[in-house]
Image: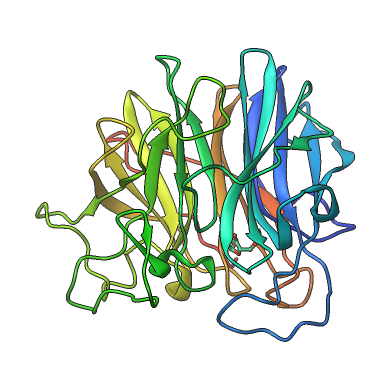
Amino acid sequence: MKPRYLVPNDYMADPAVHIFEGKLFIYPSHDRESGIPENDNGDHFDMNDYHVFSMEDIDGEVTDHGVTLKVEDIAWAGRQLWDCDAAFRNGKYYLYFSLKDKNDVFHLGVAVSDTPNGVFKAQENPMKGSYSIDPCVFADDDGEYYIYFGGIWGGQLQRYRNNKALESPALPAGNEPALCPKVARLQEDMLEFAEEPRDVVILDETGKPLMQGDTERRFFEASWMHKYRGKYYYSYSTGDTHLLCYAIGDNPYGPFTYRGVILTPVVGWTTHHAIVEFKGKWYLFHHDSTPSGGKTWLRSIKVVELEYNPDGTIKTIEGIR
Ligand code: FUB
């Protein structure tokens, strides 16, 4: 399949994708030109609402369901609606989002709707004990739901250790184990963590945790989880080395063993994705900044087919063709 841009008339990024009601539903963040200069904190990603999109077929029409949640409708909001994800449980749809509070600290929020396309109503407060960015919710076959999250640099993960805020942010040294993304099982009401978040440990081929200096393999942001032939595939972005990578484990908590690159760098600084099976084929939804002429803060979502090798490894996709 030829890679396809999905929303050519606007800028959307960070796609999360799920099959609801037999259709593909896409939950992106909504980039806009705010005039804020680019910096390492990501201040240029000053997004202030979300749209939801759906498709009945991978090459079919993309329906824009309009604005489904806005910064101004979230009581605890400061600024910056970054990556989000959605889940369905017990007849309700839940939208998980990254947002800075009034003190400019990122937390995760939840908003609820009766339909997959929203409108979503946000809870009064952030999820208790949540921090950093990029929620990804995974529904396991046994009925449990898990939330993965975290992102370094502008995503603020370096401000925490053992789920507690540090007095001053600190990244590990290059020869120390890398900062890990987090995972927690969700409560049955889907509104809070059911447990303290745990580290998602990514191991190298010798069984040792990846080091912070291993920048082509260590975690930076953009968690995604999918299951293939009974194995758990945790995938993520390496941020400043611009790769989408994956690691395989035997359960939702890991550890996961690094297995390779899913997508080589694209045009634009960030790379972010979702992997889903739809009508018997697997797809990688991701974004790049080609349509905006390389402006990192104006990204466009696209889809391309993803293929596995017979041994369950993923065939690397070239980001720039
Ligand atoms: O869209 C803002 C941030 O850029 C996301 O939260 C990160 O994953 C990166 O794509």
Residue at (67% x, 84% y) in the render: 38
Q: Quadrant of the C terminus?
A: bottom right
> Where is the N terminus found, in terms of image quarters?
top right
Residue 18 appears in the picture as rendered: yes
For residue 211, side relative to residue 169 (left or right): left
Up-down: is 202 above or below 62?
Answer: below
Question: Which residue of the protein is positioned furthest toward the left in this rendering?
Answer: 206
Residue 206 rendering spot, x and y as whole percentages = 9, 55
Q: How many marks?
A: 0
Residue 165 placement: quadrant: bottom left
Picture quadrant where residue 11 is located:
bottom right
Comparing 297 with 281, the one in front is 297
Relative side of 51 to 105, left or right: right
Residue visible at 37% across and 34% down in the picture:
195
Q: Is residue 219 above or below residue 255?
A: below
Position above or below: 141 against 104: above
- Residue 109, given in percent of the width and then of the height, sits at 63, 45
Q: Position of residue 87 (x, y in %)?
A: 61, 29
| Residue 3 can be seen, yes or no | no
Q: Is residue 17 above or below residue 208?
A: above
Residue 211 in which image quadrant:
bottom left
The location of residue 27, given as percent across then percent down, is: 70, 42
The residue lying at 42 percent from left, 17 percent from top is 141
- The image's colour scheme reads rainbow
**Quadrant location, ligand no. 1:** bottom right
Q: Foreground: 265 or 11?
A: 11
